[in-house]
Image (cartoon, helix red, strand yellow):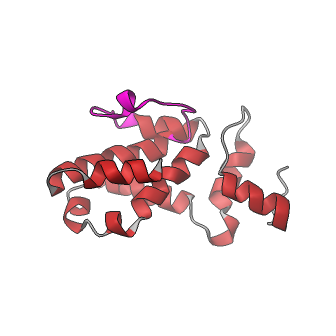
Amino acid sequence: MSYWAATQILMATNYKIRAQYLVKFIQLMDVSKTILFFRRSIIFPNTPFFFLKLLRQNGNYFSLMSIYSTLSMSVITNLHRSWKELPPAVQTLHKSLVAFLNHTSNYKPYRDALDATTEGGIPILGNIGYDCVLGGGYKGF
């Protein structure tokens, strides 16, 4: 999903269209905590802002991390003009999602949210492997 999302952003013809894709993917990160499955036709071309919040609220952390990986790629972070076009609300949302997936303290905000989930969700698979094989210090299993 990460490379597909990066391709969608980079195929845009100018920086304003790229900024619109950045907005959509940042919103998708927030929704990744909520929706388990989605189709390309739902995401593009008119994804509403609430979709990312929906993913985040439903515990789809795997998709959340996939989009986070996309937005962290150097080819995406170097789109300075496009990032400057983001509305302040989206910039704030992006900062909160980056803080949520902060790797310091062994992903504490993510792990706290995962512990608080009562109906399950889709965890970040890389963290599960680390916890099970290397004993990453997470006792949630």
| Image label count | 0
Residue at figure coordinates x 85%, y 56% from the top left: 139
Horizontal arrangement in the rendering, residue 108 relative to residue 90 (left or right): right
Q: Where residue 92 sits in the image (x, y, percent)?
A: 37, 56
Give percent across and percent down for residue 47. Answer: 33, 33
Highlighted magenta segment, given as a residue range? 32-50
Is residue 115 rendered to the left or right of residue 16?
Answer: right
Q: Is residue 115 above or below residue 44?
A: below
**With 108 as the anchor, is 40 left or right in this view?**
left
In reply to whether residue 102 is colored magenta, the answer given is no
Residue 9 placed where, x, y %? 29, 52
Q: Main secondary structure of the magenta part?
A: loop
Identity of the residue drawn at 76% across and 58% down: 129
| Residue under the image location 68 percent in, 70 percent down | 105
Can the viewer see residue 8 in this picture? Answer: yes
Residue 49 sits in quarter: top left
From where the camera sits, is residue 89 visible?
no
Q: Is residue 25 above or below residue 10?
A: above
Residue 46 position in % (x across, y down)? 28, 32
